[in-house]
Amino acid sequence: MRFKDIELRSLFPRSIRYGANVFLLTIFLLGILVIINALSARHNIRFDLTKTKRYTLSPQSVKVLQGLKEEVKAIAFYREGEAARKGAEDLLEQYAYLSKRFKYKFIDPDRHPGKAKKYEITSYGIVVVECGGKEEKVFDLTEESFTNAIIRATREGRKIIYFLQGHGEHALDDVQRSGYSLVKRTIEDQNYKVKTLLLLREKGVPQDAAVLVIGGPQKDLLPLEIEDIKKYVERGGKLLIMADPYSGQNLRRFLDGYGLHLVDDVIIDKLSRVLSGDYLTPVVSLYENHPITGNFRDASFFPVAQSITIDREPPGGIEVASLAKTGPQSWGELDRERLEKGEATFEEGRDKEGPLIVAAVSTKRVEAKGGKGKKARIVLFGDSDFITNTYFGISGNGDLFLNAVSWLAEEEDLIAIRPKPPNITPIILSPSQVRWVFWLAVVILPGAVILAGVFILARRRWRR
């Protein structure tokens, strides 16, 4: 062995041996990298380590992608090197990662004017969603707008949601604090048509009504209107009622017939700290296991709400269930006079102690045309203000309402937590902090590096 070692050393100088070792080691490392790259390309896994989950899609976007039945293409018209293009690529890549039926590509409209003309692109940053011959354009690319565009492009037709009017209900075109303009816009984004309904001018609820919404009537409904609504429900209609405290008796009697009862009280929640701690805005975080609230975790808030009770043994063919309850520290105040004076206190034996039901459902199996069974559905909320323009975007209010609409419209695949605007927390510095950052980054740290270099150079020369 010693002879062979000596022979090898004489045949191959040290430099050649070291060079061969480096070459073989490099080839070995490159081989490992190629294998890792090949495996990651076919079996890639993503982890979002950001605090705000910036690179994680909402449950609704995931649900929509998993429910795709045909291929969806997105064409993003951005210029090469455009600042917003990187963010668009990150977002579209998340969609492509979750569904093999989603494809996307970028086109520079300046280099491909023919493509831009074909899709009628007039500005940069527009994304076109294509599916089965349908096209939807997204002008302001966010997760919410893009998921809604996919919903619109992949669904046939548009169901109609009617909002009852004529009794002081919240107006759909009202952009003020108490209006429902935000509700209307959001429902339309979910591929529904929204119309108003004045029952006194119509011969009953229209046949094309997917859902009828009664949003906070200030006056009681007339017996004739109640009769029309009852006929609608009895033919398998879907009804969403949001009733404020001290609602009309006709509406209460109608609900009694379906196992739902509005209590003549106002819910007090002394621990509520919503909007400057108003104890008339109970916090709701207890949800039942129902398709509307099954995976619901966000708290919701009901300003000036009344409680609901449900029949333990409802009339034949009717099933009732609670959806959401207030906390155990709340109670239902029955003394209206003391409440108006601001002197509400819990009276044991009279007031009802929490948890209190603020949302409930009732279903009834009815006979439809052709002898086929059909289920009528009613969702009842003890408040109509929780989805006004002021409260719709707060925590889970909007999602809870939209989930109820999707369940009533038999669009259960849309029931989920919807995308929220990115939670960006800017760092705001005071003028003195800005000066400190400037001196530290521009003067002190570079100066320290320069001084260290000068010191080392001087020391070496001194040693020589």
Image: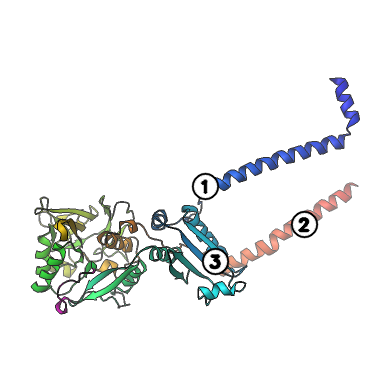
Residue name at image x 88 percent, y 51 percent: 461
Identified by mark 2, the residue type is Leu
Q: Does the magenta portion include 202?
A: yes
Judging depth in this view, the residue of 122 and 407 nearest the camera is 122
Which of pointers 2 and 3 lies earlier in the amino acid sequence? Answer: 3
Which SS class for mark 2?
helix
Identified by mark 1, the residue type is Ile
Residue name at image x 58 percent, y 72 percent: 109
Residue mark closest to the camera, 3 vs 1: 1
Label 3, on which residue? 429
- Residue 339 picture quarter: bottom left
Which SS class for mark 1?
loop
| Quadrant holding the N terminus | top right
Q: Is residue 146 above or below residue 453?
A: below
Label 2, on which residue? 451
Q: Is residue 264 above or below residue 325?
A: below
Label 1, on which residue? 45
Structure colour scheme: rainbow
Label 1 to label 2: alpha-carbon separation: 46 Å
Magenta-drawn segment: 198-208
> Mark 2, residues whose alpha carbon is within 10 Å: few (<14), some, or many (≥20)?
few
Which SS class for mark 3?
loop
Residue 346 visible (yes or no) = no
Which of pointers 3 and 1 lies earlier in the amino acid sequence? Answer: 1
Label 3 to label 1: alpha-carbon separation: 37 Å
Judging depth in this view, the residue of 464 and 321 nearest the camera is 321
Percent position of residue 48, x then y = 50, 52
- Tell me if label 1 and label 2 are in contact, CB under 8 Å: no
The outermost residue toward the bottom is: 201
Percent position of residue 349, x then y = 10, 54
Percent position of residue 443, x then y = 70, 63
